[in-house]
Amino acid sequence: MSLGRYYLRVYGALILVALGVTLVGAALVVTINGVREQAFLEHHPRPVLDWLAQHPRSVDPVNARVDSSRLRLLPRQAVSLNDVARERLEYGQVLAQRRGDAVYFYRLAPDAGVLELRAEDPYRHVAELAARTLVHVAERSRGSDPAAMGAALGVHATPLETPEQLPGPAALGRIANGGIVYHQPSPREPAHSYAALGDGTLVSIAHPSPFRYWSWPLALVLAGLVAAVLGAVVYYLLAGLHRRLRGIEGAVSRIARGELDARVSEEGDYMGRRLAGAFNRMAEHIQRLVSVQSEMIHGVSHELRTPVARIRFGVQMIEDCEDPEMLRSQLGAIDGDIQELDELIDEILTYARLEQGGPIMAVQRLDIADIVDQVIEEQQSIHPELRVESDIPEDSRTHAEADAEPRYIHRAIQNLVGNAARYASERVLVACHFDDQTMRIDVQDDGKGIPEEDWDKVFTAFARLDDSRTRSSGGYGLGLSIVRRILYWHGGQAFVGRSETLGGACFTLVWPRHQPRDQHEGSARTEDPS
């Protein structure tokens, strides 16, 4: 799975979660508001219906002031209700039921029947009923306090000092004709009714707030739902990452204790697999570096022992030597041993630089055929008794330019040709095969060759193979290891086999003709060879 597909899956999952939260939130809002609206419809008319239920004789006078089809006192048997609704009425509760566009409010009148109010607009009709009832009570009890009467009906009545406080000039005329002015600035704001009492006092009747679809408790419930879903999603994402990090933490602790083979599982989601894969590659690289370090310590101590012993022996001989000729011979031997140590140190430093972290690859566009010719000329002068020659077809010379680090690629070819010259009987052949994509160089000799069972370990550092690699032939067992690492840093490989042309060993170098752009900019490869 690519990184783009992974993010598409994550975004798709988040969209589905958002859609699910939206649907659940909408269903929750509808359900909660249904309960809230039902509670509002039953609570809002309760004060005025309670008063009318306690004063059943006032139903007809109040009914005369409103539409007769809205307020009715019905016999119990005329109302068809289920057992639960009838039981609620018996307990003195207000029952609100929707039938079509109308809402019916029932309130059981003591020793009478069922008080019914039909209201297409419940808030306005209940407000008008409360105002009409207040006017009726004021006519019955002249001189009573409007505020006390309003409190009994669930409204707040306040006398007006001047007619200018009415909402508009037409309101006074309607009130003078016995009407009631209903005024509500907006559906969300409380309504006010204006009327004239029996003694001519103008009153403003403030009604309770209407039902509001949105409220703070509902907003808090929705916010809690969103927070819970987001918390669950974040927990799910972080829980997987936490488990992965705990696994990596355990593997790190094991590596710190010396268990260098500790690895983490690469199962799970895309990012988890990438993280685990990167950690495992790092652990393998560390394990290989530690192994290389151990091999180097062992190999260096072994390789240094012989020349150091010879130098010590030569120094002891010089102390007791009186013959000038023998003295010069011992000094020459010591100088040769020092030269051998210098070459060994150079080999070790080169190998360490290639093995541990990688060199800075200053890749350039080079003519590989020219480098091959140069190496052959150098080795021919060193080994005049051999025929060191090249075989570069004309079509390969036309593709001889390739991306490579000049110093290292020269060193790789030189190591192979020099190695072949040490074990060849008469001839060394360097065959080149270049094309648009691949560079290949075969270095062959006519020596004894390398047994097939030793092919897997021939590139191992400090390895010396019986017969074909003896101490008398020279070398330190690092040359082929250096070749392998140089080819790795060029994105290629080194192989060993048998030469079908000369019968001896055949070492092959293969690498891509074009290197990544970051190689041209001098950066090194960071992956470990598989």
Image: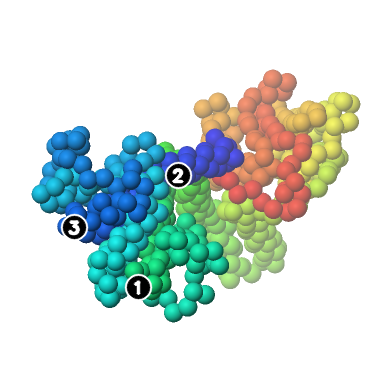
Mark 2 is on which residue type?
Thr
Which is closer to the viewer, label 2 or label 1?
A: 1
Name the residue carrying label 3.
55
Q: Identify which residue, 183 or 477, lies in the foreground.
A: 183
Q: Residue at x 42, y 44 (%)?
A: 26
Image quadrant occupied by the N terminus: top right
Q: Is residue 439 left or right of residue 252?
A: right
Task: Of the two numbered discs 2 and 1 on the same chain, state the one appearing first in sequence.
Answer: 2
Given contact means CB atoms under 8 Å apart, are the residues at marks 1 and 3 in contact? Answer: no
The amino acid type of the residue labelled 3 equals His
- Look at 24% across and 70% down and name the residue there: 141
Measured Cα–Cα span from mark 2 to mark 1: 57 Å
Mark 1 or mark 3, whichever is nearer to me: 1
Residue assigned mark 1: 199
Separation of marks 1 and 3 at Cα, in angstroms: 23 Å
Q: Which residue is mark 2?
A: 22
Q: Give x and y (percent) for residue 23.
A: 43, 41
Q: Position of residue 66 (x, y in %)?
A: 36, 51
In this rendering, the answer to whether 499 lies above or below 28 is above
Residue 42: which numbered mark, if any? none
To which quarter of the image does residue 136 belong? bottom left
Q: Disc 2 and disc 3: Cα gap in Å?
A: 49 Å
